Image (cartoon, rainbow, N blue to C red):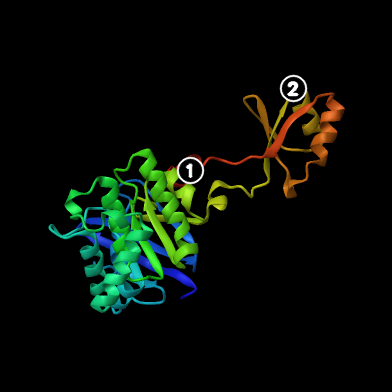
Amino acid sequence: MHAVLLELADVTKRYGPVTALSGLSGRIGDAGRRIGLLGANGAGKSTLLKLLLGLTPFEGQARVLGLDPRRDALAIRDRVGYMPEMESYLAGMTAVELCAYAGELSGLPRPAAMERAHAALYLCGLEDKRYLKVETYSTGMKQRVKLAQAVVHDPELLFLDEPTNGLDPAGREEMLALIADLPARRGVSVILSSHLLPDVERVCDEVMVLAAGKLEFTGTLSALRGDADDRFAVRVKDGLDKLAEALAAAGIDAQGDGEELSLLLPGGDTTAVFAAARAAGVQIRHLAPRRRSLEAAFLSRVRGP
């Protein structure tokens, strides 16, 4: 398996006068990771996945598992599974027929494709429905069969485009649990495209943030939230103003935020905070690293601080 999943260098996609993607650059992901491709509807997520599969022309340079989508599109599709956002099945086909056909399109002989189709449908919880025609499936079952056809050829990397679309809360949780287990169960890396922040936070280790066709951030969820900026939150029983004065006297940057103080503690050393509390005669009730929500972090990247 190639160590770096995606490599982008000034990737740009235009549809006439409309620029869908503008100058995307970066090296994304290690093997075995689950990466969220996060952005609002219309941010360019589906366009990026399609060009990486060699399905649409683009400007700039890109590599998927070290392969060039322009020259090596078929080789990429042999090694990458794709679950599209829209419904994608042939009317009249059963689930096992559809998955076996997808396996054959990936180069598997018919007997091997059929064997893997049964295994993929079992993995996705459709073993007892595999002989039903896909058009008779519920929305949740159709999403599962799309995932099954994406993994049938045992890919190294999965592109999942809005996999929880149309699912009720129980179905959504089941789909996310299944996706979260894929790297351990199948040895496959996952790129999950979604506009739903809780889905990305539930499943992913790292994240790419797309906004208006630009790549605004790549890195871990922790880095996106700013968990490592040494800022702490402190609450006391009474006397927040007294503590603020004592902290200022000790040279600690403390800012009021409702019923708590936000402190910058380089290195995370809290010793001086407890000393200031003793000096002010107040009792600390809460002192912990301050973490922004993923929503706040995402909006700051999209809209600016």
Position of residue 302 measured from the top left corner of the image (x, y, whole percent): 42, 46
Position of residue 260 measured from the top left corner of the image (x, y, whole percent): 67, 28
Residue at horizontal 79 percent and vertical 36 percent from the top = 273
- Please indicate, yes or no, whether residue 209 appears anywhere in the rendered image: no
Q: Is mark 1 on a helix, strand or loop?
A: helix
In this rendering, the answer to whether 96 lies above or below 253 is below
Of the numbered discs 1 and 2, the one sitting upstream in the chain is 2
Q: How many labels does the image show?
A: 2
Q: Nearer the viewer, residue 18 or 29?
A: 29
Q: Which residue lies furthest to the left in this view?
A: 92
To which residue does mark 2 refer?
237
In this rendering, the answer to whether 305 lies above or below 211 is above
Position of residue 20 measured from the top left corner of the image (x, y, whole percent): 28, 56
Q: Which of 121 and 66 is in front in this view?
A: 121
Horizontal placement of 101 versus 209: left or right?
A: left
Circle 1 packing at 10 Å, graded few (<14), some (14-19), many (20+), is few
In this rendering, the answer to whether 264 lies above or below 132 is above
Q: Residue furthest front?
A: 128
Q: Is mark 2 on a helix, strand or loop?
A: loop
| Amino acid found under the numbered disc labelled 2 | Lys
Marks 1/2: CA–CA distance: 32 Å
Q: Nearer the viewer, residue 257 or 71?
A: 71
Return the mark for residue 300: 1
Circle 2 packing at 10 Å, graded few (<14), some (14-19), many (20+), is few
Q: Nearer the viewer, residue 230 or 284?
A: 284
Horizontal placement of 161 versus 1: left or right?
A: left
Residue at horizontal 23 percent and vertical 53 percent from the top = 86
Residue at horizontal 34 percent and vertical 76 percent from the top = 68
| Amino acid found under the numbered disc labelled 1 | Ser
Residue at horizontal 22 percent and vertical 49 percent from the top = 137
Position of residue 124 measured from the top left corner of the image (x, y, whole percent): 36, 56
- Please indicate, yes or no, whether residue 72 appears anywhere in the rendered image: yes
